[in-house]
Structures are given as structure tokens and as C-alpha cells.
Image (cartoon, coloured by chain):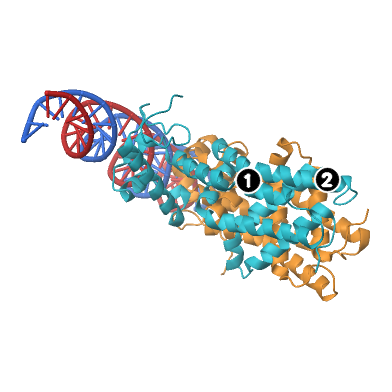
Chain colours: A orange, B cyan, C red, D blue
Amino acid sequence: MTADQGTKPDETEEPRAADGRVPGRRGQATRQKLLDCAADMLRTTSYRDLKVVDIAREAGTSPATFYQYFPDVESAILVLADEMVATGTEQFADLVTANTWKGRAGYEGAEALAAAMLSFWGQHQPVLRVIDLATDEGDPRFANIRIHLLNDLNNALSAAAKEQQKAGKGQPGIDSEAIAGVLVAMLAHVSAHRLGFELWGVRADDLQSTMARIVYWTVTGQKPPA
Amino acid sequence: MTADQGTKPDETEEPRAADGRVPGRRGQATRQKLLDCAADMLRTTSYRDLKVVDIAREAGTSPATFYQYFPDVESAILVLADEMVATGTEQFADLVTANTWKGRAGYEGAEALAAAMLSFWGQHQPVLRVIDLATDEGDPRFANIRIHLLNDLNNALSAAAKEQQKAGKGQPGIDSEAIAGVLVAMLAHVSAHRLGFELWGVRADDLQSTMARIVYWTVTGQKPPA
DNA sequence: AGCGTATCTGACGGCCCGTCAGGACGATGC
DNA sequence: GCATCGTCCTGACGGGCCGTCAGATACGCT
């Protein structure tokens, strides 16, 4: 309210500080540096081994400074996760709703979805890894992030499946939410473990095709063309 | 070798103690009590919050006693996981290899597999939860357990898929290992999160049918009967 | 330059972990 | 019954990391 605090570009929401104060220019700089360092370290260090003291040292500051901007390590990663979700959450759902699910073009839409998932998980692997881990561990904050990320896709797939069912195609007599849930679970889990598959000798191309074919057939009940 | 130690029923392997000694009757009793208490507490407490002191107190003993039988909490859970795997690892693979993959009987075999997975994950939910978590976290000990649990199923599905491919059915031109990997990932992940699905309003029956249909179609390329 | 405020930090108490020396218990021989 | 020995258990301790606070520092403004 009455937000006229100089040239402040009105960041998304309020980047609240530790003691309630609103951080200034320099404060936000160090805050960002801490975030960057945390993101960097996540690439090499397991999330459980990510200590506050290490992040602070990497950023050239002291642990106490960290706590001035984040209540704990998880909160910092949550910010990273929020940014990531904000940049790419709706693209998956769009790939589903924009799909005609007919013939070759329909199958290629499924292939595009699988490719997008694999690519997204490849790019944001470290953060997504933490989201999955913390969610499975029962942390509701990360669970919400995960829902935000996958909910649109889930709804889109459910709608597509139901649409096909009405046309006498797809999987008869099965709750479309179950269909969507299983497909989303498959897509997310396989994408998250692509590296593991490759280490096991399975190529990403084959994963992508397999997932695309399963998605296409499960939604439409039609054999993928060629 | 030369195992004639009275009425001792020759337990699997050597239940080694802390300081190298072989534990006696009473020692094994408390060891088992610690395991039982750990298993019990896993049902209510998150694996990360499972402290040694809590297990010891629950078992009516002291933390130091725990360390006499297990180097850490994870090792204790590993024993539980080993027992679980030993009791039910091959049943999944058998359900695949025994399947003819033809007609209604073939589809019912797939349904039986999905049902078995859901049931197994329901029974052993707490321990399997830890296995998944620790594996994702990079713990190689739990990763090995997980491989032992799913490897036979993976190989069986891969063999079945390849068999169908040779007969001109199934998914043409795709590595059967990728097919098996995706299916196993789906089965395991959905089974692990059945409770979450149900909380979301999705019935286990629909999950089972969806998974069974996907498995059957992916392996055979045939539409499930009825 | 001088002052007020935003920002940073060294140092501290608290919690949990894993270990060790020593005490309690139970079986065995007499 | 009781001495003795081996098995088993535990109270107490040092160490590491966490999160906080009062004080020091640096910047912006007049």
C-alpha cells in the first residue's frame, strides 16, 4: 500500500528481511549472492549435506548473515524452487491442451511432452531433486511447490483423457484422474532418474519414445503411428 | 563351517556384534527388540527424525546399547529392508515370466502384477519409504537393496517385451530395457504413493487397472480385452 | 566531515551424536 | 550357597553443528 519508496522496482511480493525490516539495495545483493552460491553448491553437494556455514563461506560472508535473509537452508532452496516453477510451470499443460491427440500430429504432441519433461528435469535437476526429496520426506512447503508444478499438467491430461472417453476412445470405465495421476507420476519419475537410466545403459531417446507412446496410447487408446 | 552350536537354528549369515564378538542369546534378544521398536517407530515417525536415543528409550534401554549392535540408525533399517526383500523379491518376476501375455489371461496377469505391487508397498510402506528416500539421497547401501528388489522384475519385463518384439508385437524399435525401466518406475512410484493418490480422491482400484492396462499394452501392443 | 541507519560478524549456549570405562546380571563349578 | 568369570548394559563425556545476540563496520546523506 502507498508503495512509493524511490526507484525500487517493486519486486514480486515482499522480499522480507530477518528482523521484519525491508532489505535495501546492498542487502538484496548479498541475499542474491547467497542464493546463487546455494544453487551452485546444490549441483555438487547432496541437499542433506548442504550446511549453512558452507554456503556462507562460499559467498564470502558469515553464517549469521545467512540467517538474516533466510530462516533455514530449506527456505533458501524454496526461493530457488519458486523461481524455477515460475519460469516453466505452464508449458507442460499447454503441450497437452494444444494437442489434437489425432494421428501422427497427436503422437508427436505426446513426444514433445516427454521431451519437454526430460529437458526441464535435466536443466533444473539439482532443485527438482530437492523438491522430490523434501516432498517425500513430508515437508509441506516443498509438496506445495511440487503440486504447483505438476497440477496443471495433471488437470490437462485428465481433461484430455475424459474427452477421449466421451468419444468412445481411451480407457473405458476408469477415473480420468487416475489415468492422469499415473501418467504424471511416470513422466516425472522417469525424467528425474534419466541419469540413472543412462548409467544403466538406457538411452534417453528410448525413454522419451517409450513415455510418449504410453502417454499417447493411454489417453487415446490408439496405437501410435509408425 | 562345522556349525554345531547346540539348538541354534543357524541364522542367515553372522549376526556380528559391535566389538567383533558374536552376541549370545540375550544379546540377540535385545538386538531384535531394537529392530522391532525401530520398525514400529518408522510407522509414525519420519525416517530423518528417527533418533538413536528415541529407539533406545522405546526399547527400554540406553543409546549406548544400540551402538553395540548397529553402527548407526541406517544400518538397523538396512537389516529390516534385507528381511523384507528376502521374503518377497521374486514374486513380481514370477508374475511376469509365468504370464502368457495372451488374451484375457494375459491381461489378468498384468492386473495381478499391479495388484501385487500395490499390496507389497502397502504392507511394507515404512521400510520401502526409507529405501526410496535414502536411495534418492545417494546412499549406495539402500540403492543396492532397491536394485535387488526390482532387478528381477525389470529383467523379466525386459525379456517379455523383447519376446513380443520378436513376434512382431509390442513396441517396435525400442530398447526393451527402456520399456522395462519405464514400466518398473511407474509401478514402483505409483505403488509408493498410493496413499497420496487416495488422499487426492483417486481410488486404488483405478490405479491398479490403469497400471495393468499400461503394462499389458506396452508389452504386447494389444488392447486389453473388455 | 559528521551522524544515523543498514549491514555484517565473532562469540556463545544448546542439542544430539557416538564412545569409553566401569557396574550389573546370569551362568557355571564346587 | 557362593565365588568367579564372561556377557551385557549404562552414565557420563568430548565434539560438531545449529541458530542468536550484542557489538563493530560501512554506507548514504546533509
Task: Identify the residue at horizontal 58%, vertical 53% (top origin).
Answer: A79
Mark 2 belongs to which subunit?
B
Give how far across and how far down residue B51 sits, in percent.
Answer: 39, 46
Question: Is there CB contact under 8 Å for labels 2 and 1?
Answer: no
Q: Tell me: residue A8, above or below residue A220.
A: above
CA gap between label 2 and label 1 equals 20 Å
- Residue B173 visible: no
Mark 1 residue type: Glu
Mark 1 belongs to which subunit?
B
Q: Tell me: residue B107, above or below residue B5.
A: below
Of label 2 and label 1, which has the lower sequence position? 1
Residues beneath discs 2 and 1 located on the same chain: yes
Q: Quadrant of residue B175?
A: top right
- Residue A209 visible: yes
At label 1, counting other C-alpha atoms closer than 10 Å, the crowd grade (few under 14, some 14-19, many 20 or more) is: some
Using residue A25 as the reference point, say whether residue B95 is left or right of it. Answer: right
Q: Which residue is mark 1?
A: B90
* Outermost residue to the bottom: A166
At label 2, counting other C-alpha atoms closer than 10 Å, the crowd grade (few under 14, some 14-19, many 20 or more) is: some
Give how far across and how far down residue B78 sits, in percent.
Answer: 49, 41
Q: Tell me: residue A125, above or below residue A98.
A: above
The residue tagged with tag 2: helix, strand or loop? helix
Front residue of this view, candidates B165 and B198: B165
Q: Quadrant of residue D15?
A: top left
Q: Quadrant of residue A100?
A: bottom right
Front residue of this view, candidates B142 and D6: D6
Task: Identify the residue at horizontal 50%, vertical 35% (top origin).
Answer: A57
Give how far across and how far down residue A67 sits, in percent.
Answer: 46, 47
Q: Quadrant of the N terminus of chain A?
A: bottom right
Q: Which residue is mark 2?
A: B163
Give how far across and how far down residue A113 sits, in percent.
Answer: 80, 55
